[in-house]
Amino acid sequence: MIQTLYQRLGEAKGISQLVDDVMAAHLANPLIKTRFENIKDLDRAKRMAREFFGAGSGGPEPYTGKDMVAAHKGMNISEQEYLAATDDILGAMDKNKHDEETKKDVLAIIYSLKNHIMRM
Ligand code: HEM
């Protein structure tokens, strides 16, 4: 049976683990760590990321956060930073033993968002 991306990511529990690992990777990544160290409410940011990936992969939870342009407006995120964040996400997916097909699907979503996030 064909599984949704949400199911392949391990549903709410798998996505929660993934977001924890991605945030830890961002905070350890010299190219982007200061961006994330300066977030005032890290718990909220992580909750929004869980909702975003849940809703965006076909899960039942609604996304209650800002759209991607509004969320990143005024940050002037560079191409290098975008690639660094993408590497962190794919690295966290490796850590959680997600397969190549699932990584490709996530990468396609991330790539499609670049013009809503970079250089805003
Ligand atoms: C790779 C694709 C990305 C996705 C899917 C994404 C997603 C999100 C989401 C869902 C939020 C929460 C929105 C809200 O507060 O309502 C957020 C906030 C944020 N993002 Fe991104 N983001 C991406 C890339 C990046 C990059 C490359 C950076 C910087 C290097 C970045 C820095 C931030 C920061 C600092 C916040 C927190 C703003 C705050 O609450 O103060 N994001 N992002």
Image: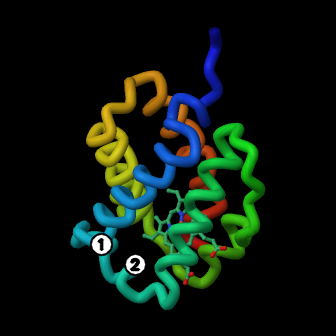
Left or right: residue 114 compared with residue 29: right
Q: Residue furthest top?
A: 1
For the point 38% across and 25% down, the residue is 99
Left or right: residue 3 compared with residue 22: right
Q: Nearer the viewer, residue 79 or 104?
A: 104
Judging by the rendered image, the residue that carries numbered circle 1 is 27
For the point 48% across and 28% down, the residue is 102
Q: How many marks?
A: 2
Left or right: residue 95 compared with residue 44: left
Amino acid found under the numbered disc labelled 1: Leu
Mark 2 Cα within 10 Å, few/some/many (few <14, many 20+)?
some
Q: Mark 2 and mark 1 in contact (Cβ < 8 Å)?
A: yes
Dot 2: element: helix
Check residue 65 in the rendering and tell me which mark sits there, or answer none. Answer: none
Q: Residue furthest front?
A: 13
Image quadrant holding the C terminus, namely: bottom right
Please state the quadrant of the image where ligand 1 appears.
Answer: bottom right
Vertical order, 83 against 5 (above or below): below
Horizontal and vertical percent for residue 51?
64, 58
Amino acid found under the numbered disc labelled 2: Phe
The picture quadrant where one finds residue 116 is bottom right
Vertical order, 93 against 16 (above or below): above
Judging by the rendered image, the residue that carries numbered circle 2 is 36
Is label 2's Cβ within 8 Å of ligand 1?
yes
Mark 1 Cα within 10 Å, few/some/many (few <14, many 20+)?
some
Vertical order, 27 against 99 (above or below): below
Image quadrant holding the N terminus, namely: top right
Left or right: residue 63 compared with residue 46: right
Disc with the residue nearer the chain's start (1 vs 2): 1
Horizontal and vertical percent for residue 17?
41, 52
Horizontal and vertical percent for residue 70?
71, 75
The picture quadrant where one finds residue 119 is bottom right
